[in-house]
Amino acid sequence: MKRTAVTVCCGLAASAAATALVFGQRELARIEAQQARLGARQTQLDALEQQLDAALADREATRRELDALREQVVGETEARIASLEQRLAAAAAGTEHARALASELARAKHGVERFHSQMSTDFERTKALVDAYMCEVRAKEASAAHELTEARGQIRTLASTIYQDRDELTRRMLLPTVQLNGEDTVGSGTIVFSGPNPERGGAVESYVLTSYHVVRNILADTPRARREGFDVTVYLPGEDLVVTGEMIASDPTIDAALVQLDTQRVLPNVANVLPRGEVAQIRVWDPVCAVGCPLGNDPVPSKGEVSSLHNELNGANYWMVNAPTYFGNSGGGIYRADTKQLIGVFSKIYTHGQGRPVVVPHMGLCTPMDLIYGWLESHDLEHLLCSERVTRVDLRQLAAPPK
């Protein structure tokens, strides 16, 4: 696009006012010629403005060029205004030339104002369009995330409702449960690893996750357990295997302990631990299953929901579940009922009153798995929770009848 600088040449001498009467006719002719030149330049400016208006139809593609062009036109017009003001001051008041200069000056100022207004309007319009687009994108992202969460919940609910294989439930939640035995104390635990340990040269090892206070009480009321270890009953299909256990790591602040079993046998049933990155997905109302050995019984399950995710006790945060529990459930597992994943270790049960307190079985606290991961990581033992990962539901299996 050709850019032409509009200039106004004036041959008025500094003494034009003094000699206007003598050379009036000659001056008028010169003024008329100058007005003609100004008219031609105005025609060029109008043509340039028309080209600018046509280019605005494709605003996004030509924005930078148009802005630069507007700035150039504004600069040239402002320079022309300054020149016209100087010439107007030098012209004799009331002459035709002065009126022409004043008219030209007014048109030039109006043009500058229009350019400034148009540039401001285009900027605001573009900003409004961008803001509206970003709001729409954010709304669609939020809606998609919400729909994805709902879809996952519906899949889990559908899987837990349709695919209720009792043998599978037993294998994944009951059989990984063990009983820790003292002379006057019993508690529960969950097998989280059994097999060759790559961190120990491939030797077969088995580990149980439990509550610290369970092991503490057993060691307190069973003196030989400090020297020889304590009995741990492992439940296998068709048999109960009693092995010796020894606590190798503990953290009283989160009521957690890790027990190693003295056996070279690979135990077939290991809990499927919730991956660390999925702990944040647990919500109140999520269905859960508590598995333990209350009052020294063989492992029994009870169903409920997550009641609360915020229960601070002794500086640690516990989850509350309303699945019925009792004395002896301590150290046992809390599982997601839909995916059968271990999400916590049962720790404490609420009681009411003093002297002869009443147990509140539907108000239990468990140590959440994120605290367990952090604690084991501090001992370089977090690899023991990576023995199995079954986090996705195969929809083709949902239509298959239970075996």
Image (cartoon, grey):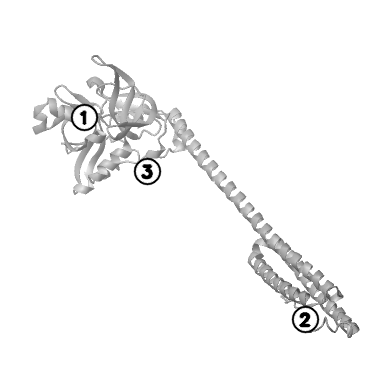
Image quadrant holding the N terminus, namely bottom right
Helix or strand or loop: what does disc 2 sit on?
Answer: loop
Write down the residue under mark 1: 213
Q: Which residue is drawn at 53% across and 45% down?
A: 141
Where is residue 9 shown, x and y percent of the image? Answer: 77, 81
Helix or strand or loop: what does disc 1 sit on?
Answer: helix
Q: Distance between the residues labelled 2 and 3?
A: 78 Å
Where is residue 373 shown, x and y percent of the image? Answer: 29, 41
| Mark earlier in primary sequence (3, 1) | 1
Q: Which residue is drawn at 33% across and 30% down?
A: 334
Query: Does residue 98 appear anywhere in the picture?
Result: yes
Q: How far apart are marks 3 and 1 (CA)?
A: 28 Å
Say if 59 sits above or below 246 in the image: below
Q: In this view, does 382 lie to the left or right of 308?
A: left
Where is residue 273 shown, x and y percent of the image? Answer: 32, 38
| Mark earlier in primary sequence (2, 3) | 2
Q: In this view, does 7 lie to the left or right of 220?
A: right
Residue type at the position of mark 3: Gly
Quarter residue 180 falls in: top left
Q: Which mark is residue 277?
A: 3
Q: Mark 2 or mark 3, which is nearer to you?
A: 2
Residue type at the position of mark 2: Cys
Helix or strand or loop: what does disc 3 sit on?
Answer: helix
Write down the residue under mark 2: 9
